[in-house]
Image (tube, rainbow, N blue to C red):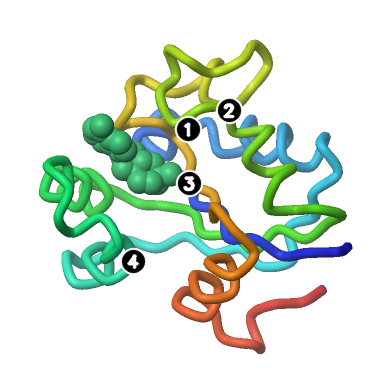
Amino acid sequence: AIERTLSIIKPDATARNITGKIIDKLESAGLRVIAQKRARWSKADAEAFYAVHKDRPFFGDLVAFMTSGPIVLQVLEGEGAVAKNREVMGATNPADAADGTIRKEFAENIERNSVHGSDSAENARGEIAQCFSEEEIVG
Ligand code: CMP
């Protein structure tokens, strides 16, 4: 089925000016960018987005990192977009990521891992609604 998923290019990647290289990987995998904006998250934005991780030991560091610089938020659309995006991103920890994946090529470590992607179609709907208005999405 044609799905939508939320993608975020993280501050480690915007700092190194490699957003285009990452978008090329997504588009080459057949995903279409149907919404995109650059933003700088407040602490409240990052805490709300990552609320499911609030009890994890890395939560404070994650919020600090995600607010440390600009990010690029995207809605991606395509056949099986949630799974396809996760395949192109590679494992959360770049040490475990397969060759050719975004995280294998670009991520610095498990926290500074260059990209986020929704982990299910249901979470994708929630994350997209959190980050974009309907008018910003042009399919
Ligand atoms: P992401 O897919 O955005 O979802 C949660 C993020 O938390 C994850 O990518 C990493 O950036 C970060 N993260 C996950 N596990 C760890 C960990 N063990 N240590 C530090 N950061 C982590």
- Measured as percent of width and height from the top left, residue 78 is found at 83, 56
Decide which of tag 1 and tag 2 comes sooner along the chain.
1
Secondary structure of the residue carrying tag 1 is: loop
| Closer to viewer: mark 3 or mark 1 | 3
| In this view, 10 is above or below 49 | above
Tag 3: residue type? Answer: His
CA gap, disc 1 and disc 2: 20 Å
> Quick one: label 4 or label 2, which is nearer the N terminus?
4
Percent coordinates x, y for residue 37 in the rendering: 54, 64
Which callout, 3 or 1, points at the residue further toward the start of the chain? Answer: 1
Residue marked by disc 2? 90
- Asked if the residues shown at circle 4 and circle 2 are in contact, with their CB atoms under 8 angstroms apart, the answer is no
**As drawn, 136 above or below 51:** below
| CA distance separating discs 3 and 1 | 17 Å
- Could you tell me how far apart the alpha carbons at marks 1 and 4 are, in whole angstroms? 24 Å
Checking the image for residue 17, the label placed there is 1
Disc 3 CB within 8 Å of nearest ligand 1 atom: yes
Using the numbered discs, state the Cα–Cα distance from disc 4 to disc 3 in whole angstroms.
Answer: 11 Å
Type of the residue with mark 4: Phe
Query: Is residue 104 rendered to the left or right of residue 134?
Result: left
- Does residue 86 sit above or below 94 in this rendering? below
Inter-mark Cα distance, 3 to 2 = 10 Å
Answer few, some or many: residues within 10 Å of disc 1's Cα (few below 14, many 20 plus, some between 14 and 19).
few
Residue ID for mark 4: 49
The amino acid sitting under disc 2 is Gly
User: Which residue is label 3 attached to?
Assistant: 116
Whether tag 4 and tag 3 are in contact, CB under 8 A, the answer is no
Amino acid bearing label 1: Asn
Say which of 90 and 11 sits in front.
90
Q: Residue at x 64, y 30 (%)?
A: 21
Mark 2 element type: loop
